[in-house]
Image (spheres, rainbow, N blue to C red):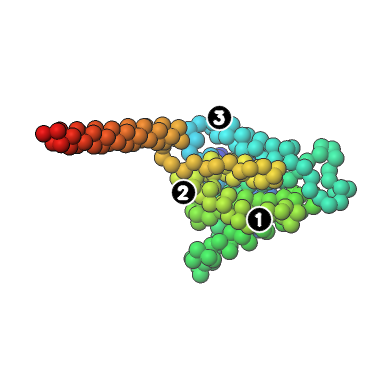
């Protein structure tokens, strides 16, 4: 009996911290009211029930630090942006806050058998993100957004509230930048990048430039400078040789005339 109890407890513990293999938007946990099911130790704007973001960490302490860093980034957005509600009475005063960004990560969505095309997966991701944002209702006046990532489905989608005025082209660009990281299974880095880019957009700042080369930017700039120096030296050498050759021909002509 004791052994059965231990096995049952271990199974339940693994269930709580590993989550389902796939989710629907209605079975997905709320990180504010079900933080443990989201892999968090306290209410959070970040939910990762399958531990996708933390899976590659080398130690439990490092995992906790990374999750706390992610939560801080989301809180920074709230604290560094202004309330956009047309009716100021809808803006919270204590404490005052701006836009809310939440992140929802799953290993895989629960899809129907006929949802195999890229278009159907994107459509399912849109529904998933929209339903989660509607269920959570974390904005003041529909001024929140949810970044939704499904790792195995290889899809990311951002559900944006009606009070957030961001062009679809900007959302697509930020999603494409995030996918650069996700294709390398750098989920934390990609989500952090997307969060920071949205923060810039919401603060009406210029977005950061994504450097997507295997070599650091300073290395390529140094190599480019060396190439320019070599080309300039080569061109100067060719010009110098041409000038000397022309002068030699003229001296030969003068010598022939004198004779």
- Decide which of tag 1 and tag 3 comes sooner along the chain: 3
Point 79% across, 48% down: residue: 84
- Decide which of tag 2 and tag 3 comes sooner along the chain: 3
Point 35% across, 34% down: residue: 232
Structural distance between the alpha carbons of marks 2 and 3:
26 Å
Q: Which mark is residue 70?
A: none
**Residue 202 appears in the picture as rendered:** yes
Point out residue 238 in the picture as x, y percentages from the top left corner: 27, 36
Point out residue 91 in the picture as x, y percentages from the top left corner: 83, 46
Point 81% across, 50% down: residue: 85
Regarding mark 3 in the picture, which secondary structure is present there?
Answer: helix
Q: Nearer the viewer, mark 1 or mark 3?
A: 1
- Quadrant of the drawing holding the C terminus: top left
Structural distance between the alpha carbons of marks 1 and 2:
25 Å
**Residue 254 located left or right of residue 156:** left
Residue corresponding to mark 2: 183
Regarding mark 1 in the picture, which secondary structure is present there?
Answer: loop
């Amino acid at each position: 009996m004791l052994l059965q109890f231990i096995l049952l407890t271990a199974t339940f513990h693994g269930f709580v911290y590993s989550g389902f293999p796939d989710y629907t938007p209605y079975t997905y946990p709320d990180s504010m009211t079900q933080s443990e099911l989201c892999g968090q130790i306290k209410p959070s704007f970040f939910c990762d029930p399958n531990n996708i973001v933390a899976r590659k960490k080398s130690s439990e302490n490092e995992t906790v630090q990374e999750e706390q860093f992610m939560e801080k980034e989301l809180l920074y957005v709230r604290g560094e942006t202004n309330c956009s509600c047309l009716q100021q009475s809808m803006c919270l005063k204590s404490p005052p806050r701006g836009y809310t960004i939440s992140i929802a990560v799953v290993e895989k969505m629960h899809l129907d058998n006929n949802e195999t095309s890229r278009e159907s997966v994107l459509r399912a991701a849109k529904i998933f993100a929209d339903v989660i944002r509607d269920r959570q209702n974390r904005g003041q006046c529909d001024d929140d957004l949810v970044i939704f990532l499904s790792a195995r489905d290889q899809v990311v989608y951002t559900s944006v509230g009606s009070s957030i005025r961001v062009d679809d082209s900007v959302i697509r660009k930020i999603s494409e930048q995030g996918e650069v990281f996700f294709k390398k299974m750098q989920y934390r880095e990609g989500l952090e990048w997307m969060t920071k880019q949205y923060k810039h957009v919401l603060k009406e700042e210029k977005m950061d430039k994504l450097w997507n080369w295997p070599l650091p930017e300073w290395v390529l700039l140094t190599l480019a400078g060396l190439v320019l120096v070599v080309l300039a030296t080569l061109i100067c050498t060719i010009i110098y040789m041409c000038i000397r050759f022309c002068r030699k021909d003229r001296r030969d002509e003068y010598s022939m005339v004198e004779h």
